[in-house]
Image (cartoon, grey):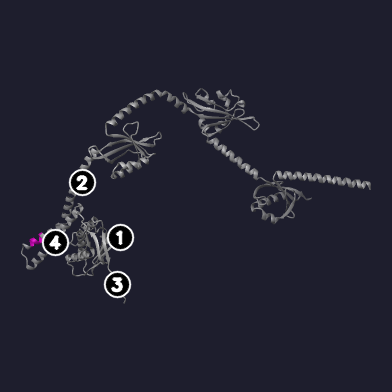
Amino acid sequence: MAAAVAYILMSNQKERKIKEDGDKQNRRLVNILTSGNVTLWTYDTLKKEFTMYDNDLSSFTETFEEMQERMEPADFENLMSCVAKVAQGLSEKEVFLQQVSRRYGGKQAELTVTPLNKNYSGQCTSLLVTQHDITKEQQQRVEDEKAMKMYQSIFDGSFFDVFIFDREGYLVDLNQHACDTLNVRTPQDIIKDKPNVKDVENLSEFVFQDLESHTMVTIVEYFEGMEKVRILPVVKPGQKRYFETALIPIFDDKGEFVYLCLRGLDITEVVEGFHNIRKSSKALETATQRISEVINDADHVLSSIDCKLSVFDPGKRRQYFYHTIDVPTMELDEIEIFYTIQPESYRVVMDNILKAINRVDERLTFPMHSNYKNDDGSERWLKMIFNPSYDEKGRVVRYVGALYNDSQLIATTNKLTEERQKALEAETVKSSFLKNMSYEIRTPLNTIVGFSDLLGSAHSEEDEKVFVAEIKKNSDMLLNLISNVILISRLDSNMVQIKKQSCDMTVEFNKMCHDSWDKAGNTQVPLMVESPYESLEVEIDETHLQMIVDKIIENAARYTTEGSVHCRMEYVGGAITFTFEDTGCGIPEDKLPIIMERFVRVNEDDNYGSGLGLPICKAMAELMGGTVGVSSTLGKGTQVWVTIPCLVSEMKRKKIVYVEE
């Protein structure tokens, strides 16, 4: 019994120790899993069940279908492919990247599948799946890539020459700017030759491990065999280049020297520019003295003549005037300029100011009529001449020129222009009269002469009546033609004056239409005059309006043999419109666009009429500030309307009476 009790006690003690060791191992495993963001799975290949273990090694089971529903389709397909390979013995280990883990907050994870248990025949009965959360590693990798890209961008985009040497002094990297200085295409073209920084004479004595950041100016001159020192810039014989060089040692976290950074900047142009300035200082002093002399001479010239130096600044939009070169005597902005000139000069001045503001690269020359008089009281005309001035890049920065008194020349030119215009107007009147007279006068004149000759020969009494009628008809036509030609010549020469007077247009229009109809002598069709007013007092030129009505009604009476002729009037929008509508033969469609031109007839075979009626109406209406329009349908009639602006002092419309049937 004692032995049994001892055995039981020993067994219990051993069991407690095993349990304590197991708990200890479990805690260690939990710590490893937690710190490494690792989760354990097992997969029973016979039951097709997944057992999931949390960080505290508590477990739960999911079926094949539950796991398939929980995972993304692509991830589940990859998992089962790996499981199949390991379960069939085709692989001892399969790893794939799970893109999305719904169970673990949508994080990325790396899954590893390995065999766990096998039966007596060697078939895997369970598999072990470890899930490693790699989100932090992935983020760190992305951050490292960003940092590397940023470093590379700064390294390659620098306008310095940057060389990196290892602790032994061998070149390991350089940027593109340095490649250009060394006249090589890529960094590898020079790194492959393993050049050493100690090959450079003035750098060979430095102990880079003990060196702090050091800056110096290096002069590179050509010497025999310098092409063997691959990290020296290309220099031609007789050439000298200056470089500002900085040596920067780079240490690791432990303070050990690992790299040397050499930064260079070509300052040859700066140094040579400084030398050139010193060399040319005496020449500059001489040029300054000469400029002072020229300025004094220019001041004397400006003060002795009626001329001012002027500068226009497009940026400030201001114009400066100088009696002497050094100090402006007057300053005007773009608005104040217009206070000094007459309105007639506004347009040309504005156009040139806009050109100057837009920095147009051209010479600007324009006249201006000043608000101020000359000393003798005559009109003052100025002429401005501007030439563009450029900066070192060839861009227009200002305009420099002169403003001088051009009054005498302008006055003489204006006088000559006025006299020439008068001569041209006289010549135009003469030419227009002769042209119009000679164009149409021959036909009626030849007819009169021909029938007059027939009267002097043997003829019967009946023939004499015909001859006399033709002579009278062509005499009237010739008289009408001459009157029209003279009238249109006067219109062309602006010799017709419009004189407005007040009248009751309702009464006058009715009288004008009937008087014109009586003159036309058409008794075959009725004339109807319509007006919606009992009275309409307007200010208008009755005399010239009567001429327009005469010619329009004359045409209507001549070409209307049946139907009627309607005349209407209406006052709308500050103008009175007269409409004349007939039921005559109409105007051919091809003649409508040119019917207002001179000597155009509706029918070319019609010898009566000169083709000046409508052109005279058009010119007369335009002189009165109005318009004339024509519309027509061949065989159905013609409509002519005349619109004349006028003032109404009194208007009284007719009352409309509605009668029920």
Earlier residue among tags 1 and 2:
2
Mark drawn on residue 573:
1
Question: Can the viewer see residue 119?
Answer: yes
User: How far is mark 1 from mark 3, CA to CA?
Assistant: 26 Å
Q: Residue 657 in the image: x percent, y percent? A: 29, 72
Earlier residue among tags 4 and 3:
4
Q: Which corner quadrant of the image does residue 411 belong to?
A: top left
Q: Residue 263 in the image: x percent, y percent? A: 54, 30
User: How far is mark 4 from mark 2, CA to CA?
Assistant: 37 Å
The label nearer to you, 4 versus 2, is 2
Earlier residue among tags 1 and 4:
4
Q: Does the CB distance between marks 1 and 2 fall below 8 Å?
A: no
Earlier residue among tags 4 and 2:
2
Name the chief secondary structure element in magenta.
helix
Q: Residue at x 58, y 41 (%)?
A: 146
Mark 3: few/some/many CA within 10 Å (<14, 14-19, 20+): few
Residue type indicated by callout 2: Gln
Mark drawn on residue 421:
2
Q: Residue at x 29, y 59 (%)?
A: 574
Mark 4: few/some/many CA within 10 Å (<14, 14-19, 20+): few
Q: Badge 3 is on which residue?
A: 657
In the image, which residues are magenta? 449-454
Q: Is residue 112 above or below residue 319?
A: below
Whether residue 116 is in magenta: the answer is no
Q: Is residue 350 left or right of residue 374?
A: right
